[in-house]
Image: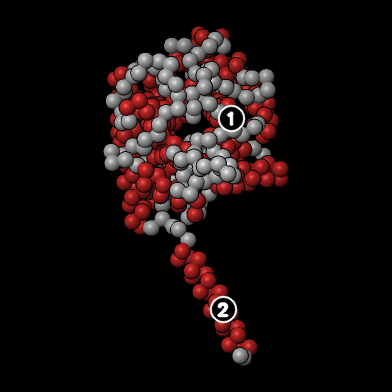
Amino acid sequence: MSHFLQSMSYFLQIGLGAFLIIVFIPRIAVSEERSLTQAVQKGATILEQSGHNWKKNKTCFSCHHQTLPMLGLVEASALRDPKQDRSWLKMQADLTHEFFQERKESLNKGNSIGGGATSVAFGLWAMYLDQRMADETTEAMIRYLLHVQHKEGYWFGTCNRPPLQQSNIAVTVMVLQYAPRYASPSQQAELKKAQEKALQWLEQAPLKTQEDRVWRLWGLHTLGDRSNKATIEKIQALRQTILENQRKDGGWNQAGDLKEGQPEKASDAYSTGQTLFILRLTGSKIEEVSLVKASRYLLEKQDAGGSWHVKTRVRPVQADFDNGDPHGKDQFLSIAATGWAVTGLAQMLPPKESPSVSPAK
């Protein structure tokens, strides 16, 4: 064969290979974009109703019915009525602020509060999502956090209710991301010392669950020194571990580990939506195979009404309470899971429909 024909044959092979790669890489098709939009809209409607239900039934703040539904509606904002959502976010933030305002004296003294630093961190995040300004209540919340920081540098909850109130890494990253916005001028120096100690702990904290992994990834990406080679290597290794633990069905599980020789634990919408969202915020692209598979898992698992069902793993410590949301005794965790699922899927929408506001990018 002549040199010219050999060259042509080579380039044709390369071109065909590139064509096959383009064709067969899983991507979000136009029909799936419509499905994503519909799934986000239906899920956001469930979240909106859950907030109204909670307002009628309860006066206490909760991470599962305030912060995560708020996050979902903020991320879905491009697909919804902004005036209606503005009013709803205000309602949720008002409830949050009133709850902590009533406990301002206890917070300033560092006295115990239900949920501990977990509740306070989620509360600050909720007010951030409504773009609330700092005031005496948020100053008291920061004072409490400065009081209760563990000597090793992390923040922690006062109860173990997986997955929402289990990860010290998640609580610590929340505090690191949202406390600076609400600390008063007189608190800034003390907070800076607390932050430095917490970041040192975060870089070496043991990872036990999927919640630990994704929040550490988010924390190091947002708060770590990305000019430092060692930090970059930690972020890359952590991202790779997360991707390697994706299940065959495209989802992730709260436990996080895929162990050789052991049966694969089922994926769940809570961990899958959360992981999808955090991977996007930390640099993953919507066309990446792992993210496409995750979004397809969530589309498949959404129920006809628009929510995602995740079974609770918490032993009941209080009398059963029905907020009127889907999935009976599993409704609190399922609303949280729906919040994460909506948030993750909204991040997979094309730029023209992507959310205009996202927390702490």
Residue 242: in sight, yes or no? no
Residue 33 at x, y percent in the picture? 36, 53
Tell me the quadrant of the picture where the N terminus can be found. bottom right
**154, 290: nearer the viewer:** 290
Question: Residue 192: where, in percent of width, then height?
Answer: 65, 25
Apparent side of residue 358 relative to residue 204 in the rendered image (left or right):
left
- Residue drawn where x is 40% and y is 31% of the image: 311
Q: Earlier in the sequence, mark 2 or mark 1?
A: 2
Q: Residue at x 47, y 11 (%)?
A: 103
**In terms of image quadrants, where is residue 151?**
top right
C-alpha separation, residue under disc 2 versus residue under disc 1: 51 Å
Pinpoint residue 14: horizontal percent, then vertical percent.
56, 74
Circle 1 packing at 10 Å, graded few (<14), some (14-19), many (20+), is: many
In-image side of 266 versus 201 (left or right): left
Q: Which mark is residue 169?
A: 1
> Is residue 234 in view from this perspective?
yes
**Residue 29: % across, % down:** 38, 58
**SS under mark 1:** helix
Tag shown at residue 11? 2
The secondary structure type at the circle numbered 2 is helix
**Residue at position x 57%, y 11% in the image:** 110
